[in-house]
Amino acid sequence: MYDVFVYPEATRIAGVDEVGRGPLVGAVVTAAVILDPQRPIVGLADSKQLSEKRRLALYDEIKDKALSWSLGRAEPEEIDQLNILHATMLAMQRAVAGLHLTPDYVLIDGNRCPLLPVPALAVVKGDSRVAEISAASILAKVTRDREMVELDARFPEYGFAQHKGYPTAYHLEKLALLGATEYHRRSFAPVKRVLGLA
């Protein structure tokens, strides 16, 4: 059940979420979404709670019906340079900046907000409490999952399509056996160890 966050002055509320803080490989991907109250989307929920089929259907519907949506990202090199928290904040800033409509309020999933030119509020478990954040979580997850499937086609031996880059036992085994790809995050401990940097 969604909470109702009421901002008397706000007419355009953007929700922002990220996917990919925990994986050892690939970008952290963010999305920002301003929904259209005249075109409601039924079935929005935290992307992790939805089946892949439902996520894909909602992904297309969100892109079709939202007043504005945008993706942001931070690449592995930026994650290694800044650390994952700061890289995530940067990716969120990029997602908000990419909206073609300027929001007057931004709701961020989690417990902290990036520095933004408009008022913002962090909402813990926002992806299951705020429709705009749910929509953002779906766009970000489908986008990143697709990138992992593409990476899997280039490096099939790592199993990226299955574990999406997260440090599963299979991924760690292959990492130890095969070494790191250019897309692995060198600042993350399991990758550091394989590269002899730990």
Image (spheres, rainbow, N blue to C red):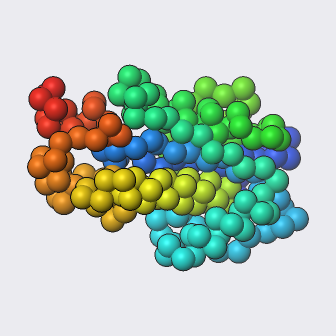
Q: As displayed, is residue 2 above or below residue 5?
A: below
Left or right of residue 28, residue 2 in this image: right
190 to the left or right of 182: left
Above or below residue 187? Residue 67 is below
Instruction: Say whether residue 154 is left or right of residue 2.
Output: left
Give the camera-side residue of 162 and 28: 162
**Residue at screen point 64% across, 73% down:** 57
Going by the image, does 123 lie left or right of 198? right
What residue do we see at 52% from left, 32% from top? Answer: 89
Residue located 13% across and 35% down the image: 193
Residue at the limit of the structure toward the front, as seen here: 154
| Position of residue 153 measured from the top left corner of the image (x, y, whole percent) | 38, 59
| Viewer can see residue 115 | yes
Q: Is residue 3 visible to us here?
A: no
Q: In which quarter of the image is residue 103?
A: top right
Q: Considering the image in quadrants, where does the C terminus appear?
A: top left
Q: In this view, does 152 lie above or below 43?
A: above
**Could you tell me residue 110's position as x and y percent?**
50, 45
Q: Position of residue 105 (x, y in %)?
A: 74, 40
Which quadrant would residue 97 be assigned to in this image?
top right
In which quadrant of the rendered image does the N terminus lie? Answer: bottom right
* Number of on-image labels: 0
- Which residue shows up at 37% across the image and 62% down it? 161
Where is residue 130? Give x, y as percent. Answer: 64, 57
Q: Nearer the viewer, residue 150 or 91?
A: 150
The extreme top residue here reads: 81
